[in-house]
Image: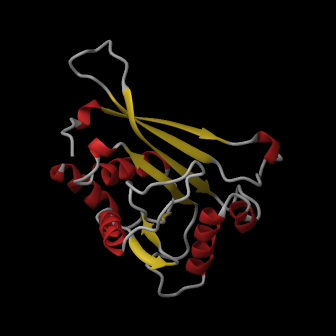
Amino acid sequence: MKAVDLYAIRLDIGSMLHLGMCDGERTDEAPRWFVQIMLEDGDEPDAEPIQIGHMQFLMVDEAMVGRVFDSLDALDGHASRHAEVILALADDAEAPVEMPFGPYLIVESVQLDEPYRGRGLGTYLTGMAIKMIGPGCDIVTVYPFPLDTQRDEDGVAVEPATSEAMAAIGRSWERLGFRPYRLGVYVLDRRYATFEKSLSELPKRL
């Protein structure tokens, strides 16, 4: 991993919602959040920062988004997988979350340029993005997949990841407090102290 000063990293965050999908109070589309991971040059204050990665999230609030499953299912199979898990959580007395739970956040994708991978930088930055975007979200879900997976122009993996790679990426999410649940999806309950404690410990490993 290339050495990087955390003070030189900036997260630029924005969101998108099609107003044509809204009726003023509710929407048929979950708002999408985009995060650009920017690296600033501390030695050159006037230099333009460079982008070294990006993330994408979906925020789902059932008080705002009507027909949640249909809304996510209309996006892609990846989003509908998360919808199935959320529905299962609500009916599972042994789920690794407290009941009831409110709005939730879906981690759609995390990409970090190859020189900056390793030692948990991507995990830490994702945790910080979750903290900034979803302070009101009780639950966060993610379908872990290795960052170095080769994908086609549609973002689909060209080859399946090895079991070793999947195990390694799963462990990285567990360091943030995520727990494996079902359909390959990991779940985090932000109301537990594990998340904040784990997030504060991660920079020490970088």
Residue 73, percent from left and from top: 71, 65
Residue 11 placement, left or right of 152: left
Q: Is residue 182 above or below residue 63?
A: below
Q: Is residue 17 above or below residue 168?
A: above
Residue 60, percent from left and from top: 62, 58
Residue 64, percent from left and from top: 71, 55
* Colour setting: secondary structure
User: Residue lying furthest top in this view?
Assistant: 46
User: Residue lying furthest bottom in this view?
Assistant: 93
User: Residue lying furthest left in this view?
Assistant: 204
- In front: 147, or 153? 153
Name the residue at 32% across, 62% down: 176
Name the residue at 38% across, 60% down: 146
Residue 38, percent from left and from top: 38, 32
Q: Quadrant of residue 186?
A: bottom left
- In front: 124, or 136? 124
Q: Is residue 76 visible in this depiction of the protein?
A: yes
